[in-house]
Image: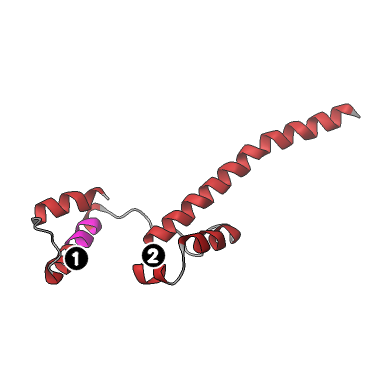
């Protein structure tokens, strides 16, 4: 009788780190999904409410965005710069200064 109980406990203890890793991955996916949301979408809810719903659904409803290619990232930074320049919010930066920080993100 002791042997089956010992085996069950051993397998239970071995499985618990797997669940922790899975929930950690889900939390990271939810956080990444929140960060990739537009400001307008983020204004519709709080981070706490979004992450709670995301974790209950076992992850975001859409997969997290794939890492951008360097060319795609350069285009995105150029578009951000153009928008900042039109709005007059460059903060006295040159494009070279802005792009170097933008490309690191």
Q: Tell me which residue sits at (67%, 34%) in the image.
A: 14
Q: Is residue 100 left or right of residue 56?
A: left
Say which residue label 1 marks: 79
**Distance from Cα at disc 1 to Cα at disc 2:** 17 Å
Q: Residue 40's quadrant in the figure?
A: bottom left
What kind of colouring is applied to the model shown? secondary structure
Residue appearing at x 16%, y 66% in the figure: 84
User: SS at mark 2?
Assistant: loop
Q: Position of residue 72 (x, y in %)?
A: 24, 59
Pointer 1 with pointer 2, Cβ within 8 A? no
Q: Dot 2 corresponds to which residue? A: 37
Which stretch did the figure color magenta?
A: 72-78
> Which quarter of the figure has residue 90?
bottom left
Badge 1 or badge 2: first in the primary sequence: 2
Residue at the image position 34 percent from the left and 53 percent from the top? 67
Q: Secondary structure at mark 1?
A: helix
Dominant secondary-structure state across the stretch colored magenta: helix
Hey, which quadrant is residue 82 in on the image? bottom left
């Amino acid at each position: 009788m002791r042997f089956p109980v010992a085996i069950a406990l051993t397998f239970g203890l071995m499985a618990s780190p797997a669940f922790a890793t899975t929930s950690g991955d889900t939390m990271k996916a939810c956080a990444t999904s929140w960060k990739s949301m537009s400001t307008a979408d983020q204004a519709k809810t709080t981070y706490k409410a979004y992450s709670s719903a995301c974790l209950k659904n076992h992850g975001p409803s859409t997969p997290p965005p794939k890492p951008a290619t360097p060319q795609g990232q350069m285009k995105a930074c150029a578009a951000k710069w153009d928008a900042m320049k039109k709005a007059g919010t460059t903060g006295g930066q040159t494009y070279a200064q802005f792009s170097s920080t933008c490309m690191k993100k």
